[in-house]
């Protein structure tokens, strides 16, 4: 297993991780030493990768995923959610946007490394699928069959990147939950700047582009899936639009949340 030791300046650590990711197929090695370019179909991971890709189990707000500086504290509502609860009914995420999770995601989203994306998609599905059971039971009680809706990419961004990272992350989760995947349920009607290019104040001010929801969300429970959450402004806006369009409820699932005090991609 390559050495992912976190010694040295941050820039050197990041460069070392990127070099290792280039030499392997995506930074993940199975416990028996196998490597594959077909994605993370059958963990276990080796101990070092498993530690670097560990889910966040404590030290966060269960309503919005905000990470607290102390990762050992039991989950508790943050001040923002106590003042104004988010519009969704349930929030679920895999882990913190740091270490190997961050490097795999950057390789996936910004450099087209689809095997790295499949690793993350499998980890997200295995963590989040069991947690969504209560929300999906609530959806059935309300008479609203559930849909899994990945956050869309504007068609221009889709042409530039070649894929919608949230859609690829959503596929294993849709399969595990046996939910229809509905990327057409809503979309962006105007292109805005990439979230990774905005500072925290600009993100908190809310999205500067228009959203449109399809009639098919009317009477349905929507599981909304995004990749990395920082302020949550976009997800809050989308959830409100979905509910206004007739969705009976919204649950949110994201791969990762940025660490406390950080919004860097």
Image (cartoon, helix red, strand yellow):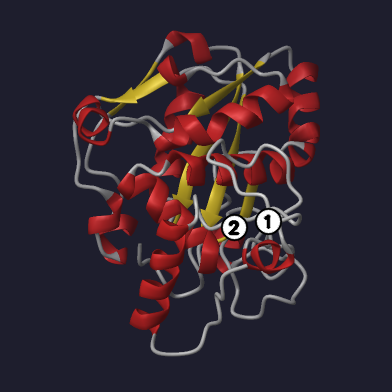
Depth order, front residue of 130/205: 130
Q: Position of residue 178 (x, y in %)?
A: 71, 18
Question: In the figure, is residue 10 to the left or right of 136?
Answer: left
Question: In the figure, is residue 95 to the left or right of 187?
Answer: right
- Compared to 145, does 53 lie above or below? below
- The residue located at (76%, 54%) in the rendering is 32
Q: Position of residue 251 (x, y in %)?
A: 62, 35
Looking at the rendered image, the quarter that the N terminus falls into is bottom right
Q: Position of residue 154 (x, y in %)?
A: 26, 29
Marks 1 and 2: in contact by CB < 8 Å? yes
Label 2 crowd (10 A; few <14 / some 14-19 / many >=20): many
- The residue located at (75%, 26%) in the rendering is 136
Depth order, front residue of 248/131: 131
The label number, if any, that marks residue 62 in the structure image: 1
Q: Is residue 230 visible?
A: no
Q: Position of residue 126 (x, y in %)?
A: 73, 41
Q: Which residue bears the numbered disc 2? A: 65
Q: Is residue 192 visible?
A: yes
- The residue located at (19%, 46%) in the rendering is 193
């Amino acid at each position: 297993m390559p050495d992912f030791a976190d010694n040295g300046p941050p820039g050197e650590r990041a460069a070392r991780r990127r070099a290792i990711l280039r030499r392997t197929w995506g930074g993940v090695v199975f416990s028996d030493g196998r490597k594959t370019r077909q994605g993370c179909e059958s963990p276990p991971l080796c101990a070092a990768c498993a530690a670097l890709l560990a889910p966040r189990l404590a030290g966060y707000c269960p309503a919005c995923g905000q990470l607290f500086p102390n990762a050992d504290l039991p989950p508790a509502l943050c001040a923002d959610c106590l003042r104004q609860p988010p519009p969704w009914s349930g929030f679920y995420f895999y882990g913190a946007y740091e270490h190997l999770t961050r490097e795999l995601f950057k390789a996936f989203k910004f450099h087209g490394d689809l095997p790295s994306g499949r690793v993350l998609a499998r980890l997200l599905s295995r963590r989040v699928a069991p947690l969504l059971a209560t929300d999906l039971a609530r959806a059935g009680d309300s008479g609203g069959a559930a849909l899994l809706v990945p956050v869309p990419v504007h068609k221009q961004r889709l042409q530039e990147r070649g894929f919608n990272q949230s859609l690829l992350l959503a596929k294993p989760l849709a399969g595990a939950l046996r939910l229809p995947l509905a990327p057409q349920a809503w979309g962006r009607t105007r292109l805005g700047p990439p979230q990774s290019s905005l500072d925290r104040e600009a993100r908190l001010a809310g999205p500067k582009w228009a959203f449109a929801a399809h009639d098919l969300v009317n009477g349905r429970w929507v599981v909304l899936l995004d990749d990395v959450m920082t302020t949550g402004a976009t997800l809050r806006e989308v959830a409100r639009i979905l509910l206004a369009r007739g969705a009976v409820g919204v649950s949110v699932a994201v791969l990762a949340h940025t660490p406390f005090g950080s919004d860097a991609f």
